[in-house]
Image (cartoon, rainbow, N blue to C red):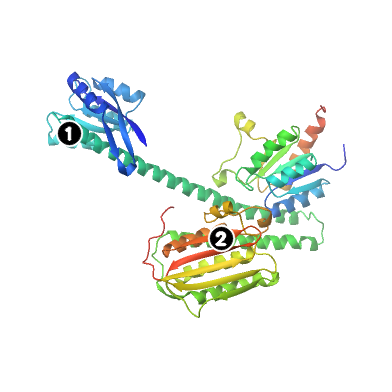
Amino acid sequence: MLESLKILVVDDEPGMRLGAERALSAFRVSLPEFNGDVTFVVDLAGTGEEALAKIGSAPPDIMLLDHKLPGISGLDILNRLMQDKVDVLTIMMTAYASLDTAITATKRGAYDFLAKPFTPTELKASVRKAVRHLLLQRQARKLAQEKRQVRFQFISVLAHELKAPLAAIEGYLQIIEGRTLGADLAPYNPMVERSLVRLQGMRKLILDLLDLTRIESGNKNRERVAVNVCQVARTAMETALPDAKPRNISLALQAPQSVQLTGDPGEIEIILNNLVSNAVKYNRDGGRVDIGIAAHDGEVKITVADTGIGMTPEEARKLFQDFVRIKNEKTRNILGSGLGLSIVKKLAQLYGGDVSVDSEPGHGSTFTVVLKCDAATQAPASNK
Amino acid sequence: MSAHKKILVVDDDPDITDQLTVMLKKEGYEVVVAGGQTEAEEALISGKPDLAVVDLMMETQDAGLILCHEIRRLYPELPVIILTSVKAATGLSFTPSSPDEQSWVQANCVLDKPVRPERLKAEIARLLTQVAAKPQA
């Protein structure tokens, strides 16, 4: 990557301007950490007034600013930039580098000093330092901006997901209120049922959201005790049974009596509950859910295989992101918060592991979670 | 003019399509339901409806908008109502106010979800009358 930065040299001595221009116009800073080189376009100004005019029309990235100028002084320029909130990384050039001047200039936003007279090498070193600072600063700003953007998108989608069940329930209530289907109550029964289902879905979303918030808020309240993953799996199967039974879906566990892991029982429960309930939800009637738990090399491997609708590789790639729900004909009537698998992924990462999926459309999916038995307490992913 | 005007209802939320079906059938309309952009496109090709009610966020965030363009291409005169919960409250503001935005959104009217049944019925009746009043080309 090659980047070109604009440097404005402000000095009333023509010799200084020329020397700086000569030193910098062929100068190339290479920064392996940004994997790229930086070159410079040098612009010159002989007075403070000229400098302000140039900054006003197109602010430079870096400015080399003489302290003593005939009209407006270097400090005055710094003041103006501060006032107008114009961000120019400034290196002050002073003949008498008094401490007083240095402090004043720094207070007004100067980044560095260069005592006159200086050699081209000194000038280059100082510019190099400024470029590094500038790029780091820009990178930090970009990251902060991206973080805000992700947060904003999350909240937007969340609001939409919370409004959807409300709209559905409100719609049913309006139909019932208006006795649209007559005075007899029976035709309204399916609407009451659907409203209750949507309310359940909304409650699940709120609970998932709380899980997610807890995971992302840090590990203050995380327990670290011995957890028997097999026991947790058996509980998850029992939890899923009321949904599996009416649809004739069988659940089987292949695991030793006990597989121990150090962690938070609540978190392991969330992982297994989410995977097992998904395996039931996205299964076909009469299908199977096979849960496997095995430990080796200090890792616990959990697999949950279903015989359900499966998904395409393209769908699988998006699956573990917040609010991603695979929307198609087959999933239309399946309720979900869209957060379950992103929670599983975040939790797995807390245990030094990860989650993956292997799937074939129409045949089923197998989710594999790997957790470290004794994962050092890791800081939660702070990508939010 | 046939007695039963045909309305195409497009929404990926089956509860919403069920409700619209109940509501519109009660008003004497014939209702065709599509659960998404693709299904709607198939329905459009197999027969021209008299009006379409379209949700915005379906398979993708802009599925509804693309569908509206598709409808305009197939049947330029067909009135389209966008019914959406993508509004200011969700942060994804959606109010085509300027003429420029309106030209971009190919719909006759945008209603916020949940919509009062009376409001939707009134808009549908208004748009159907408008079309009937226009001389047929």
Instruction: Report the number of numbered marks.
Output: 2
Q: Residue at x 55, y 55 (%)?
A: A319
Quadrant into which the N terminus of chain A falls = top left
Labelled pair 1, 2 in contact (Cβ < 8 Å): no
To which residue does mark 2 refer?
Answer: A358
Q: Is B119 rendered above or below residue A277?
A: above
Direction from residue A117 to residue B100 in the image, left or right: right
Residue B101 placed where, x, y %?
Answer: 60, 32
Chain assignment, label 2: A
Asked whether residue A95 is in view, the answer is yes
Q: Residue A372 occupies which quadrant of the picture? A: bottom left
Mark number displayed over residue A122: 1
Q: Quadrant of residue A23?
A: top left
Parent chain of label 1:
A
| Residue A383 placement (x, y as % from top left) | 43, 53
Q: Which residue is at 53% across, 73% downward?
A: A233
User: Element under label 2?
Assistant: strand
Compare residues A255 and A217 and report the one nearer the observer: A255
Q: Amino acid at mark 1?
A: Glu
In the rendered image, the vertical position of residue A307 relative to residue A124, given as above or below: below
Q: Nearer the viewer, residue B51 or A341?
A: A341
Camera-side residue of B73 and A84: B73
A301 sits to left or right of A174:
left
Mark 1 Cα-neighbour bin, 10 Å: few <14, some 14–19, many ≥20: few
Among the 4 quarters of the image, the one containing residue A45: top left
State which mark lies toward you, 1 or 2.
Answer: 2
Q: Earlier in the sequence, mark 1 or mark 2?
A: 1
The reply to whether residue A214 is visible in this rendering is no
- The kind of residue on which mark 2 rests is Asp
Q: Secondary structure at mark 1?
A: helix
